[in-house]
């Protein structure tokens, strides 16, 4: 595994240290560190869940699809796990993995232009009225 590593505790500490700061005050490195830590924690949790499910069911093939299949860290973790479990791996080529990130970024751009910004205490909501 390459890149920055941090678990949920490190992410929580970074979020608490930056509470009350606006996004314009967060450095690119701080933002990248939090994102990398979150990715590492999520990939690790998914790897654990897939390993448990594979052991319970005895599957011989692991597969991922959809937008999440474009995540290089997850792809690498699935390949590594499949090798350890002696399973085959099925996943689409990167060209066929689509993600909603571009649409979310587009909406965020318009929110930012309209001055609709929040600090790091903002609670995540799975649905947003557009």
Image (cartoon, helix red, strand yellow):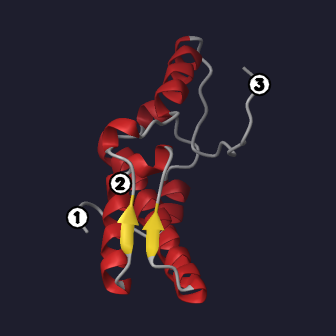
Q: Tell me the number on the disc at residue 2.
A: 1
Q: Point out the tag, 3 or 2, that comes first from the N-terminus.
A: 2
Q: Nearer the viewer, residue 61 or 76?
A: 61
Residue 12 as seen in the image, left or right of residue 126? left
Question: Which sits in the foreground, 19 or 73?
Answer: 73
| Disc 1: CA contacts within 10 A as few (<14), some (14-19) or many (>=20) | few
| Pointer 3 residue | 129
How crowded is the residue under tag 3: few (<14 C-alpha within 10 Å), some, or many (20+)?
few
Q: Secondary structure at mark 1?
A: loop
Q: Secondary structure at mark 3?
A: loop
Q: Which residue appears at 45% of the width and 79% of the height? A: 60
Outermost residue, left side: 2
Provide residue 117's location: percent of width, then percent of height. Answer: 59, 26
Mark 3 or mark 1, which has the lower sequence index?
1
Camera-side residue of 18 and 83: 83
Q: Residue at x 38, y 51 (%)?
A: 71
Which SS class for mark 2? helix
Point 42% across, 35% down: residue: 25
List the single residue furthest toward the top. 114
Nearer the camera: disc 2 or disc 1? 1
Residue at image mark 2: 33
- Cα–Cα gap, marks 3 and 1: 37 Å
Of residues 25 and 113, the one drawn nearer to the viewer in this rendering: 113
Query: CB of mark 3 within 8 Å of CB of mark 2?
Result: no
Percent position of residue 80, x then y? 31, 74
Q: Nearer the viewer, mark 3 or mark 2?
A: 3
Q: Is residue 3 above or below residue 27?
A: below
Looking at the image, tell me whether mark 2 or mark 1 is earlier in sequence order. 1
Query: Going by the image, does 33 lie left or right of 15?
Result: left
Left or right position of 121 against 76:
right
Q: CA distance from mark 3 to mark 2?
A: 29 Å
């Amino acid at each position: 595994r390459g890149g920055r590593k941090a678990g949920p505790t490190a992410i929580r500490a970074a979020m608490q240290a930056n509470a009350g700061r606006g996004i314009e005050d967060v450095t690119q490195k701080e933002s990248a560190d939090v994102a990398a830590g979150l990715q590492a924690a999520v990939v690790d949790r998914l790897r654990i869940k897939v390993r448990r499910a594979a052991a319970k069911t005895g599957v011989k093939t692991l597969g991922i699809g959809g937008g999440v299949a474009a995540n290089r860290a997850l792809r690498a973790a699935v390949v590594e796990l499949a090798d350890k479990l002696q399973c085959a791996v099925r996943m689409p080529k990167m060209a066929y993995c689509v993600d909603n990130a571009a649409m979310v970024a587009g909406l965020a751009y318009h929110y930012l232009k309209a001055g609709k910004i929040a600090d790091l205490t903002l609670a995540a909501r799975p649905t947003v009225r557009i």
